[in-house]
Image: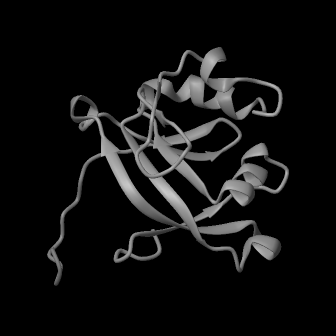
């Protein structure tokens, strides 16, 4: 997150990735947040390219239509965030897209599921306990 109102997300997508070309072409995407139980699937998905593989079919992911973008939601994920590219100024230099979250979905049955944070090359951190501190804003 780089801003809360409007909700903006900075997203780096390597120029060599199929997703980079798709994001430049369509200007929209869905960010899907998987539960920890899908860690092996996440690695396998990352180790192949959408240029050659139907990742949804190969990995048995359930597609649901999004409301604001053409990209699909992934039913197995905890959260799906529909996004539109709102700034491309840093794409050439850093492969950094600024996305605006235009709609978000959460599966209430998975709301307490543990999430993954990718550290690279098959290494992940799992979320842990929540820490709440007093803030000037809710």
Q: Is residue 100 above or below residue 79?
A: below
Towards the viewer: 7 or 136: 7
- On screen, residue 125 above or below 130: above
Viewport quadrant of the N terminus? bottom left
Q: Residue at x 59, y 31 (%)?
A: 42
Say left or right for 4 vs 132: right
Q: Is residue 25 left or right of residue 78?
A: right
Image coords of residue 49 (percent x, y): 78, 33
Q: How many marks overall?
A: 0
Asked if residue 41 is positioned above or below residue 29 in the image, the reply reads: above
- The reply, left or right, for residue 93 in relation to residue 126 is right
When the figure is inspected, residue 128 is found, relative to residue 90, above or below; the finding is above
Farthest residue, direction bottom: 136
Residue 48: x %, y % from top left: 77, 29
Q: Residue at x 55, y 15 (%)?
A: 60
Q: Nearer the viewer, residue 122 or 80?
A: 80
Give the position of the C terminus as an image quadrant: bottom left
| Residue 127, image quadrant | top left
User: Residue 86 location, x and y as percent?
Assistant: 57, 72
Q: Quadrant of residue 98?
A: bottom right
Identity of the residue drawn at 75% across and 53% down: 20
* Percent coordinates x, y for residue 109 in the rendering: 22, 29
| Scheme by which the image is coloured | one colour
Residue name at image x 30 percent, y 34 percent: 113
């Amino acid at each position: 997150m780089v801003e809360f109102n409007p909700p903006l997300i900075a997203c780096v997508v390597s120029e060599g990735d199929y997703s980079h070309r798709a994001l430049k072409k369509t200007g929209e995407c869905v960010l899907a947040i998987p539960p920890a139980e899908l860690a092996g699937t996440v690695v396998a998905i990352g180790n192949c390219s959408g240029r050659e593989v139907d990742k949804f079919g190969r990995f048995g992911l359930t597609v649901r239509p999004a409301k604001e973008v053409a990209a699909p939601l992934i039913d197995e994920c905890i959260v799906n965030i529909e996004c539109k590219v709102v700034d491309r100024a840093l794409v050439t230099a850093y492969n950094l897209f600024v996305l605006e979250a235009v709609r978000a979905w959460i599966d209430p049955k998975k709301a307490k599921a543990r999430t993954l944070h990718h550290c690279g090359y098959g290494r992940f951190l799992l979320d842990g306990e929540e820490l709440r501190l007093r803030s000037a804003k809710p």
